Image (cartoon, rainbow, N blue to C red):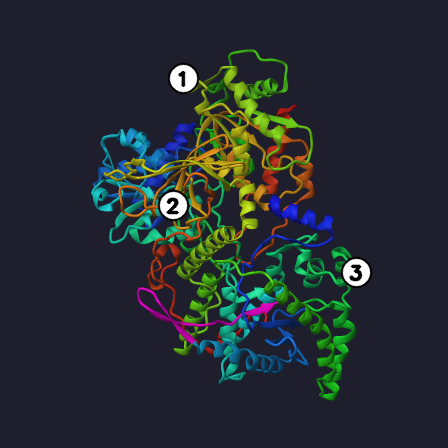
Amino acid sequence: MITLTPGQAAAEATEAILADFMGGPHRGVIVDSPPGAGKTTLVVTAATTLADSGERLMIVAQTNEQVDDLTDKLATKAPTLSIGRLHSDGFSVPSRVTRHPGVTASNKIDQVESCAVVIATADKWAYVSGHSWSWAIVDEAYQMRSDKLLAIAALFDRALFVGDPGQLDPFSVVDTERWAGLAWDPMQSAVAVIGRLNDLPVHRLPVSWRLPASAAPLVSEAFYPFASFRSGTAAADRELQLTTAGFPVPWDRTLNEAAATGWALHELPSRHTIRTDAEAVQACAGLATRLLQRGAVAHDENGSHDVGPDRIAIGCAHTDQVAAIRAAGTPAGVTVDTANRLQGREYDVTIVLHPLSGRRDATAFHLESGRLCVLTSRHRHACIVVARAGIAELLDNHPSTGRVQLNVPVKFPDGWEANHAVLAHLSNHRVGA
Amino acid sequence: MSIMSSYARALAVQNGRAQPVATVRHLHLSATPMVFIPLKLAGEAAAPLAALVGTDPANPRLLVVPQPRNRDLRFAFMAELAEVLLPYIEGLAGVTETVEAKTPYERCADAPQLLVPNRGGIAFTKLLGRSTRFRRTDGPYPVHPSVPVLGQWLTFLSERAEYAGSSALVSMTDALALHWATGQSSMEDANLATQLAWIAPPEGLDGPEAALVAEDPLTSPPAGPETHPDFDGQVLEYAIQAFETSGSAAQVREALRSQLEPTWTLMWQGVRLLRELPEAATVEARWARDRDQFTRETARLAEGGFPRGRVDGAVSAAIRLADLESALQAYEAQRAFDDPLVMIEHRVAGKAFSGEVVAVDATRRIVPAGKTRAAPRPLVTIRTSDPVRLSPGRRLVSSRNRKQRTEIVDITGDLVVIQVNDQMGRGATPAPGSVPEVGDVVCYAELDPSGGQRPRLPAGEDTPWTHGGPPEPYVPTDEDAQEAWS
């Protein structure tokens, strides 16, 4: 058997998906896409192919940020395509969207309806009625709640549902088990519902172009145990270079470890802390500052560039931690956000405040595998995890004991297990603070 | 658990007495609440055993099932329960008032309110409704005509209880926990006897001592729906055997009365404690929603409405989820704006802040995004000592006008600048009083009491293919009432 190169494997998968979407007997096709697997390329290819054959297409994404990103990429890769950016009243469209001549932005569907591609958030699409499209692409479909899909499903005949099954599930502020086990439980993701009620083909993108060779095997094994993927680049293709030598202090040793191996665990002494643990917060901000001071340069398959603040992100679990890290002297321009808001984003280096750091208990929220998956799969070069010692013991004291409910599909991977897998790997990259 | 509620619990432990966590009462308390204490048979899903029920503290009515394994006796019990509850409910349905709205409509002047001891009581009420609403009055195993009607009402009440801020079916322990923090865990607070011991300990005892006394199942039997296993094995079993041999339910009645009466006293003690608190400002409006729903359910049943299905369809589930979410959002916001002690929780969390207005730019006009003409957008600068964890662009609501929309423009140190976006009249400058003035003490929070707007969903018969397509229309059959567990 001939082993395909990553590029060939990805091209083959894309071809099969498009053939199934445009020529297959199903009304929907599901595409599971691991982090950074060229989902946007797939969407762009599908959009241009449909537009070339004179078909109109609607694209649904979940947040305005995602819609703007996608519009920008679509217009960059296909400058001749006419794209309608439908938005809500009072929303100011960013310049990265309006700079493209092919893009028409409006809050009225009538003004963009004639475009080959119309793109909007699911919330905005829900207010469109009396129009229909033959083709739709639903992006980030695993983050879309199924009731949102219900509101827009009448707009299209056939749809391609693209998303990352490993990321965070949608949630509701309402805590109810009323619909547990129902196939159309509105609190599930859109993909879970269409998958259970319709027999749809599921495709998978096999290559992550974002994750480096140091990260893809771990992320694949820990979070995608039954849908493995590989890195599109070899270990030699990516290098994070620190142009200054640094001091023999923990922050710099952590950065050295991360630059050399792609991973580092910056471990603080074991202690039970409040959520906004001052030392951990300080470490996150300090590591970002030192990384910039040491003049990191990223070398990859596209060339070399300085790692500026816009290429660094700090991720954590709670909004109060975000506020605390921002207030702790994080350099301007560095992204600090919760896992929910980092979904779909990409950076050169990420610094992660471990969701279980300093906790006394491991709740379902903190154990959710999607949260850790998002945080540890945003980087192209290196990921630095800041944590209190003792998380492995904490996990052992809190085995996951969720109630079993009838007819609710078992979800893999189990967050408890995924956490252990990541910790075991990180223990080889530990730097004691 | 928030920092504030942890703090209140710690204070309660230190002082040996529950601490108030609300200054006003956040639920409606009817003038004649129906107290309902149901008990079920251990080991069965929905086998009623007994209930103490009534609106008069001095005159409870005891209903029992002398042999709870006998299904005929269970439904005889339900028919008896209907004799108490249906006149109460239907009596309230008869009195209506006209609501002045765009299209005026009739609304019941009052609605039923059922008080049960704990969440278990709500869950059991729901199961009782489910096991009775599908029953037929003819065909095999007929029941008394009042039983399915009662089932529909119990279902209505327990479904209302899912909505945040509804007072139609209230669990006493939850209602008390909303207003007092005890020194126990929230799990322990589900025990009505110990919770009340912390809140109002008897003379000569402090909270922990009184709670210790109240843990004795002989003086404070469980508030249901489960009974104490020792009672089941040592008292109830023999009483049921006595009924089997003699045909007299007297012994069962006496045994169950001993288990229910202490809780009855506690329930009314809880009612008295809650009555002492003044009602919060928005309680009336939320109770009006309960009354609206009660009026609609009355009309639906009068037209011979089918019993509600056991599972929701795709569309009704989505609509219900949206309703539940907006009820919760509105309730949280209203509670915070009604009560400074609740607002403190949000201020500590950084989602709200309070402070003095130090500067106002009332004449500022800008062209808002998506608009072509300049409009007044005054800026208000507030100095606050609260830990604000909001960022520019976040939309806030003010305590002085809960409908006015504002957004944060800038936060520098202890100064927060907000922009007022509406509710300023039609003039070129803001109407007098519509914008705060220098020196005013104001409170802004990222909480929306309006519950938000939402798009329309397709009708049930238009359920799209993604959600399984249109469901089969419901046709009642004799098998409707069958359950895997009954």
Q: Against B303, is B187 above or below?
A: above
The chain under label 3 reads B
Q: Are marks 1 and 3 on the same chain?
A: no
Q: Are marks 1 and 3 in contact (CB under 8 Å)?
A: no
Number of the label disc, if any, that sits on residue B204 = 3
In the rendered view of the protein, which quadrant contains the C terminus of chain B?
Answer: bottom right
Q: Which amino acid type corresponds to the residue marked 1 in the rendered image? A: Gly
- What secondary structure is found at the residue carrying circle 2? strand
Say which of A138 and B385 sits in front: B385
Q: Which amino acid type corresponds to the residue marked 2 in the rendered image? A: Arg
Q: Against B190, is A31 above or below?
A: above
The chain under label 2 reads B
Residue hosting label 2: B405
Label 2 vs 3, first from the N-terminus? 3
Can residue B225 be seen from the camera position used here? no
Say which of B3 and A373 sits in front: B3
What x and y, as percent, mark residue B389? 51, 37
Residue drawn 39% across the image and 77% down it: B303
Residue hosting label 1: A303
Q: Against A261, is B273 above or below?
A: below
Can residue A271 be seen from the camera position used here? yes
The magenta segment is B96-116
What x and y, as percent, mark residue A138? 36, 44
Q: Which amino acid type corresponds to the residue marked 3 in the rendered image? A: Gly
> Which one is closest to the eye, mark 1 or mark 3?
3
